[in-house]
Amino acid sequence: MLQTVAALENLLVFMYRAVLSSVTAKKFSSDLRQFFGIAVDHHVVHTRDMNGLLTAAKKKPQAKVHPTYEAFVRKSLAKHDPNETVALALLLEDVIAQTYTKFAPRTSDESVRLVMARTAAVEVQHRVILSAAQSLSAAHLPGGIRPKDLGRLPESFVNAVLPTSTYPTDKAADPESGSVR
């Protein structure tokens, strides 16, 4: 399971970097490009975390992208369509968020569960931003907000919803605090 999520993380790093170095990136607002850059950084950290867990378990770290999705991603990126690129990123973020969510509770290792749960929350944040960008683009709002000019949104938009690469737990309630006494 850890090798699978690491392969998905590697795929997302590949996809976001490929977009940022392509002509498609020029069609995005600076905010959306900034989000893609932040997402790369997050996925690099997630890959490192998963490979660290694999190494600790004396298993081989994952250096490759997920083979099931690789050809599909390459084909989609070759089209250089900004709307399709956002849809692709949204799909991949959904796949990885659901993978973490489904399999984190099934592991018996508490440290693995914690890392996966915290990472899943960030993948969902990525998904929310991409969903918002896609919805704004499709809505053709008065004033013409389109993928190429999402920069008209407040500058703090990306930073407000993507503060860290893992979801914090410092404000979590004590597990016994709600117990019936």
Image: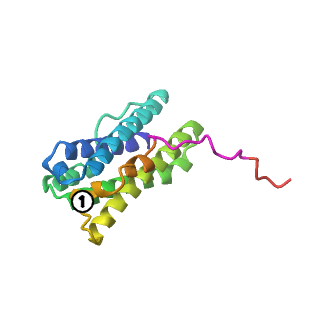
Secondary structure category for the residue under label 1: helix
Q: Is residue 38 left or right of residue 21?
A: right
Task: Please state the horizontal and vertical placement of residue 31, each as a whole percent of the image.
Answer: 30, 49
Identified at 64% across, 45% down, the residue is 172
Task: Please state the horizontal and vertical placement of residue 63, each as a whole percent of the image.
Answer: 31, 34
Q: Is residue 169 magenta?
A: yes
The vertical placement of 152 against 55, above or below, is below
The residue pinned by badge 1 equals 147
Dominant secondary structure, magenta: loop
Q: Which amino acid does the dot numbered 1 rest on?
A: Pro
In the image, 158 versus 67, the foreground residue is 158
| Residue 158 shows in the view | yes
State the image quarter where residue 37 is shown. top left
Identified at 34% across, 45% down, the residue is 8
Q: Is residue 100 magenta?
A: no
Pointer 1 local density, CA inside 10 Å: few below 14, some 14–19, many at least 20: some
Q: Which residues are magenta?
A: 164-175
The vertical placement of 141 against 130, above or below, is below
Identified at 38% across, 56% down, the residue is 129
Q: Is residue 4 left or right of residue 177?
A: left
In the image, 121 versus 147, the foreground residue is 147
Q: Quadrant of the N terminus?
A: top left
